[in-house]
Image: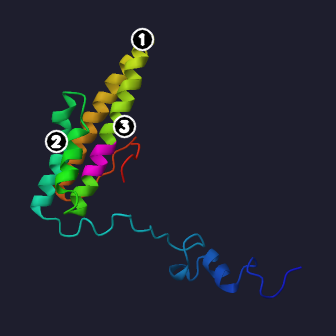
Amino acid sequence: MSTEGDSTRPTEQTQQWSRGTGAADAPAGLGGPTRPYPSPAAGITDAVDQEDRNWAMAAHLSAVVGAWLALGFIGPLAVLLIRGDRSPFVRAHCVEALNFNLSVLIYALVGWVLTFVLVGFPILLALGILWVVCTVLGLVKANRGELYRYPLTIRFVS
């Protein structure tokens, strides 16, 4: 019971796209080239000045200082409160560092509890390596004026 105006029937245009002809004009998913959507932070990294890069690097470095007291989230939080409202680039790095360090704190607490059954020791070792590597990567990306998304992060703050 299909009518002539039924939208579920392939039209001549969609058949051309699926055959590969006219693919440059095809919408994504119909055989045409897929164009990624712009990231939510698109435009943040346009013309990032050195001062903003330094503050973004401070968000990552302050986590290293705070980690000695198991409070790695305090440094990024302080930078967010001091400079986060002036620069979207600094805010993006502060939020990422804050969320990652809160996540690592939770993972470390779980790993510490699991040490009583001897499973937590390798978890804590892997977590420590992950934390150092990701923090350095975030620092390097901030220095380059690029955004960085930490892996395995629970998004508490947005």
Above or below 48: residue 91: above
Q: In the rendered image, which quarter is residue 11 located in?
A: bottom right
As shown in the figure, which amino acid type bears the numbered disc 3? Ser
Q: Where does label 1 land, which residue? A: 116
Which residue is at the far right? 1
Residue at 12% across, 53% down:
54
Give the residue at mark 3: 103
Q: Which mark is residue 61?
A: 2
The answer to which of marks 3 and 2 sits earlier in the sequence is: 2
Magenta segment, which residues?
94-99
The amino acid sitting under disc 2 is: Leu
Left-right relation of 56 to 102 = left
**Quarter of the image with the C terminus in it:** bottom left
Amino acid under label 1? Phe
Kindly identify the residue that appears in the image at 37 percent across and 25 percent down.
Answer: 109
Chain-order first, disc 1 or disc 3: 3
- Distance, label 1 to label 3, CA atoms, is 21 Å
